[in-house]
Amino acid sequence: MLSYIYNVSQEFEKKHGYSPNTLHMNYAHLECLKQQLDNPNDFAAVTDLLGMELLISQDAVHPTVGWLQTPWKHAICA
C-alpha cells in the first residue's frame, strides 16, 4: 500500500508541480496501510508518515491523492 501511495503521489507532483496534501481511501485501504507500520493503532503515525490529511469513505475504489487549500481536520466521512 505504501508503494502505491508513493507512486500516486509522485505522479500527482510531476503533473501539478507540488505535492498532494490529502489522501482519499476506504477503510480496507487504511487497514492495509496500518499493517505496514510499527504501531498500526497509532493513527497520528499514519498521517505523520504520509504528510497528508486522510479522507476516509467507502466510495473510494482506489486510494487517490489531491490538494486542498485548507485541509480538513478530523473530518468524518460516510
Image (cartoon, helix red, strand yellow):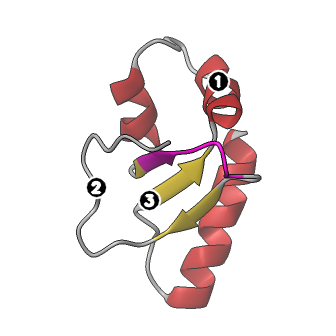
Amino acid bearing label 2:
Trp
Above/below status of 67 relative to 32: below
Query: Which residue in the protein does label 3 denote?
Result: 22
- Rounded to the nearest whole Å, what is the CA distance between mark 1 and mark 3? 17 Å
Question: Label 1: which residue?
Answer: 31
In the figure, residue 74 lies in which quadrant? top left
Residue located 46% across and 12% down the image = 41
Q: Measured from the top left, where is residue 6 in percent x and y?
A: 64, 55
Q: Residue at x 44, y 44 (%)?
A: 77
In contact (CB < 8 Å): disc 1 and disc 3: no
Q: Earlier in the sequence, mark 1 or mark 3?
A: 3
Rendered residue at 56%/64% (across/down): 65
Going from N to C along the chain, the mark reached first, 1 or 2, is 1
Q: Is residue 18 above or below residue 48?
A: below
Percent coordinates x, y for residue 32 in the rendering:
70, 27
Magenta range: 54-60
- Relative horizontal placement of residue 68, taking residue 77 as reference (left or right): left
Q: Earlier in the sequence, mark 2 or mark 3?
A: 3
Say what amino acid the circle numbered 1 marks: Glu
Mark 3 closeness class: few <14, some 14–19, many ≥20 residues within 10 Å: many
Q: Which mark is residue 72?
A: 2
Q: Residue at x 52, y 88 (%)?
A: 16
User: Quick one: which residue is furthest to the bottom in this view?
Assistant: 16
Q: CA distance from mark 1 to mark 2?
A: 21 Å
* Figure check: 70 above or below 61: below
Q: Secondary structure at mark 2?
A: loop
Task: Return the x and y of residue 27 as percentages of the image width and height.
Answer: 62, 32
Under mark 3, the amino acid is Thr
Residues 37 and 56: in front is 56
